[in-house]
Image (cartoon, coloured by chain):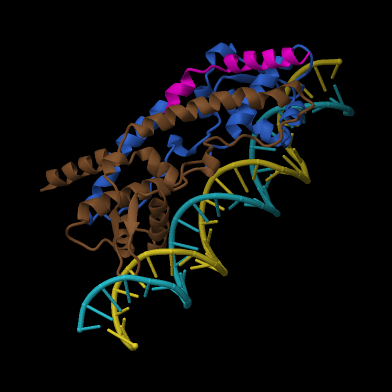
Chain colours: A brown, B blue, C yellow, D cyan
Amino acid sequence: MQISSRFTIAIHILACIDTFKDDYKVTSDFLAGSVNVNPVVIRRLLQQLKAAGIVRVTRGSGGAEIAKPLSETTMLDVYKAVDSIENGELFHFHENPNQECPVGRNIHNVLDDKLNQVQAAMENEMRSITIQDIVTETKSYIQKEL
Amino acid sequence: MQISSRFTIAIHILACIDTFKDDYKVTSDFLAGSVNVNPVVIRRLLQQLKAAGIVRVTRGSGGAEIAKPLSETTMLDVYKAVDSIENGELFHFHENPNQECPVGRNIHNVLDDKLNQVQAAMENEMRSITIQDIVTETKSYIQKEL
DNA sequence: GCTTGTTGTAATAATTGACATTACATCCAT
DNA sequence: ATGGATGTAATGTCAATTATTACAACAAGC
């Protein structure tokens, strides 16, 4: 199955907060309008991003803001913050291989190494891309529209 | 969410077929016993592996065999063969960003590049590991048990 | 201090995909 | 032809995603 859209939504949210911070109060309703999902979905994501120290959210009066430079937040940080996969394991290993079978009782050990290796390659790539990269590029696309 | 266990099961199946080819008739029931799932699950996977030219399956009299050297089959080949993710897209992009919003109508373009880049890193790693690597290592684990 | 607008979060439901299982037609070798 | 397999449709269960309603907690302005 695919990696939850929480991930792309979270990045979308961060791009919005940064882009509109000077012109609007960026509330969960505002963000929900841009992403096109229910505001509650946004609030839950903001909570997760807050727990990771990526954003600040003000209760009562409302609004979200970036907590630290987006150049210091990588795709991997966001990916982990919003729990894009379960238990941090990208691959779902079948649960009960037969321990009576020589292959069944050894395949897990062998495969785990390889799967971790693949997962690491993916996470390293994510670590190399910052949210600032994405926001900067998005703003340049917006400029080109004018 | 995680990548379907079809992927690890398929690799387990291939390891079994190769390991037991000389001593048993490797049927879907036999494989189901080692993996510990329903034989129908195995048969479906075998169909997908067959369609990818990785195994041969004999109807009627029964049994599965490897169709080409496992050193020529990579983890990526198996991954694609059994449809581990949907539409070949690892990431699920939220469907309807608001086109009225400057960020909403541009985020897709920007992000797609980055997501493809991450997915490519992962697939390249998978391409570098053959099923033969895995089977060889498994057999050496089995040897050590004796 | 009360009102207003917002966040935080629980509860519930709809939808979807994964996986399990039954059933049976089709097929091959003996 | 028969016995043991495969091929595949149909059905059911379960878990995760996402949507949505509801409301308490809260901050700021009047």
Q: Give coordinates of residue A108: x percent, y percent.
A: 65, 27
In front of the other: C1 or D11 = C1
How many callouts does the rendering have? 0
Quadrant including the C terminus of chain B = top right
> Does residue B104 appear in this view?
no
Residue drawn at (76%, 16%), measured in percent from left and top?
B145
Q: Give coordinates of residue C11: x percent, y percent.
A: 57, 69
Farthest left residue in view: A146
Give above or below for A118 relative to A42. Answer: above
Q: Is residue A12 left or right of residue B136?
A: left
In front of the other: B45 or A109 = A109
Q: Give coordinates of residue A52: x percent, y percent.
A: 40, 48
Give above or below for A57 relative to A114. Answer: below
Residue B118 included in the magenta stretch of the image: no
Q: Is residue A48 left or right of residue B81?
A: left
Q: Which residues are magenta?
A: B122-146
Residue drawn at (68%, 31%), measured in percent from left and top?
B42
In front of the other: D12 or A116 = A116
Quadrant of residue A77 within the rendered picture: top left
Give above or below for B63 relative to A52. Answer: above
Residue drawn at (58%, 18%), measured in percent from left and top?
B131
Quadrant of residue A20 within the rendered picture: bottom left
Q: Is residue A117 left or right of residue B41?
A: left
> Does residue A31 appear in this view?
yes
Q: Main SS type for the magenta part?
A: helix
Give above or below for B69 relative to C28. Answer: above
Quadrant of residue A46 within the rendered picture: bottom left
Residue B134 included in the magenta stretch of the image: yes
Q: Give coordinates of residue A10: x percent, y percent.
A: 36, 49
Residue drawn at (43%, 30%), measured in percent from left and top?
A122
